[in-house]
Amino acid sequence: MNTVVTAHGLGKQYRSRWALRDCTLEIPTGRVTGLVGPNGAGKTTLLRLIVGMLDPTVGTIEVCGGKPAADAAQLAKVGFVAQDTPTYAGLTVADHLRLGAHLNPRWDDATARSRTERLGLDPRQKAGRLSGGQRAQLALTLGLAKRPELLILDEPVASLDPLARREFLRVLMEAVAEHEISVLLSSHVVSDLERVCDHVVVLVDSQVRVAGDVDDLLATHHRISGPLREPSTLPADQHVVSASHTDRQSTYVVRTPAPILDPAWSVSALGLEDLVLSYMEGAAFAPTHPDLEVLR
Amino acid sequence: MIWLTWRQFRTQLVAVYALVAATCVVLAVTGPALAGLAHRNSDVYDVLTSNDRLLYNGGIAVLAVAPALLGIFWGAPLVAREIETGTYQLVWGQSVTRGRWLAAKLGFAVLATAVAVGLLTTAITWWAHPIDGALGSQHGSLASRMTPVSFAMRGVVPVGYAVFALLLGTLIGLVLRRSVPAMAVTLAVYVFVQIAVPLWVRPHLVPPVTSSVVISQKTLAGIEADGSGPFRITTHTADPRDWVLTNQTVDAQGHAAGLPSWFSGCLPPPPGNSAPSGKTEVHPGPGTLDACFSRLTDEGYRQRLVYQPHTHFWRLQWAETGLYLAASALLAGLSFWWTRRRLL
């Protein structure tokens, strides 16, 4: 697997609090990777470490074959659309494109212009007067026209209404198909990512809970329910993600590479959203297991 | 990066330079007439029009506030505003390192500030040159450019102040991350420095001159009689434009001393015994004091003067400018360090 991001034991400490702990992670090249987790899980911290806005307290990280933000050449390889898509309120749309042209060696002016035209953004409009959706599109245009190898978007659709959200993601997917870039985007809403991601990383409580290809994850995770049973009685290759019990029944979400053969269980498939939620709920279960990477 | 900085700065820059240009035009128009006036009249102060005085004081006011204003309104928000609005993330997402980003911003702002204040101070120094320190025969005088307030509004020091204020504002904005509190703190620190430097630093920037003066009718500047305390004598230096730091009477051994008790007999009783605590200037009548002064001299009393002669003006100017620029360089270094290591 070619990786665009490789992190080993990455951690970031703010005073006494660890915003990210022991993060070992590989993000594949040429894919759309979703970074999911509840608010405050450390998603922004991880993205900023990858962009190089932050330096890690411990661990190593390599992005596009170099140290993040080491120099201008490295910066040119990584595009970043920050949370709430900040733009200069006093500058016009055209000014923002000129800014991009002045500050990026690989700037693709034709793409930038045709995109703003297609989006119906008036070049003379001040960015401060754009709607949230238009501002997000402008920020995305800047990120794409920079022609990065890896484009990182931090909660790009969080502040958008459902229609603008769908439109934004559609445009993003078109651009990804067109330019063949790797994309890493974060969200706390899984349904946003379900449509666009083929790889996910689940971050809970400053730690990576699970990471892998969506198809692999869906194939190896099952919801099983049956008579009340202790988790310790499950086969060794079935790793419990979350569990819930009633007086007579147990329901587990388990991860296992092998099919589930025990006839006592009724087995059902999981959607991505359910899978991610299981990891968020089951946070108390997992932390002692060091290897959370899905085996292939 | 330069284009972006220019684009962000454009409006303010045009406004500031328009004001500078207007000031220069007014001074250029009135300056030659003033120089002619000073040339023709030995006591030019007496013939100044109210308009001239307004411009003179206005020039001092402009140079007093311009560096502080530029530092507060250009320096403090320079980075703090980008942090407040989150736009630093947009610009850091481009292919420009943080160091270059800050360098472009600072370089542009420092240059714009230095040139604006440089133009102002050149124009005002030129305009005021003929009348600085002018002595009037009756009504008073204008401050010499060596005196602490005037010194700061002439020559090259205002450029140093402005650059210092700008970099101070930038660093405080970086640390506080918010424009308005940064502006307030910048103003407070700047004012403190502006008071501290003339009080404690400037007198020692260039070694001052010490001289011992025989007290006589000719050198006497005044005798101060405090209602209860002893008399104090002050004398002139050779040139009234000098900046006198210490003016005290010493005895034959060279120790600071009060005047001998017999000296009070030389003076007429202070007028207005009704207000004994008030400080009263005593104007001694001529003749009556000569004997007293000779006796003082015979007993070994001298007046010790420590002062910066007016010939030190430019040396002091450059020394103080250098001091401020060195402090500015330190602030800039800290700003770069903070941007790279501590900002996030």
Image (cartoon, coloured by chain):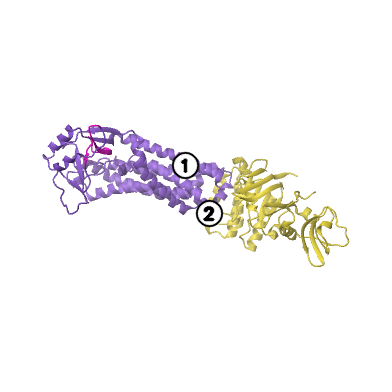
Q: Which amino acid does label 1 sit on?
A: Leu
| Residue B275, image x, y percentages | 19, 53
Q: Magenta part of the protein: which range?
A: B232-253
Return the mark for residue B331.
Answer: 1
Q: Nearer the viewer, residue B84 or A224?
A: A224
Label 1 is found on which chain of the structure?
Answer: B
**Chain that is yellow in the image:** A
Q: Which amino acid does label 2 sit on?
A: Thr
| Residue B33, image x, y percentages | 24, 43
| Residue B217, image x, y percentages | 16, 37
Return the mark for residue B85.
Answer: 2
Q: Residue extending furthest left?
A: B287
Give the Cα distance between marks 2 and 1.
24 Å
Which residue is located at x 76 percent, y 49 percent?
A: A291
Q: Colour of chain B?
A: purple
Which residue is located at x 23 percent, y 50 percent?
A: B50
In the image, taking residue A115 as reference, residue B207 lies left or right, namely left
Which secondary structure, mark 1?
helix
Label 2 is found on which chain of the structure?
Answer: B
Which secondary structure, mark 2?
helix
In the image, taking residue A146 as reference, residue A25 lies left or right, namely right
Q: Residue extending furthest front?
A: B261
| Residue A16, image x, y percentages | 60, 50
Find out whether residue B268 is within the magenta segment. Answer: no
Q: Can residue A114 be seen in this view?
A: no
Which residue is located at x 54 percent, y 51 percent?
A: B87
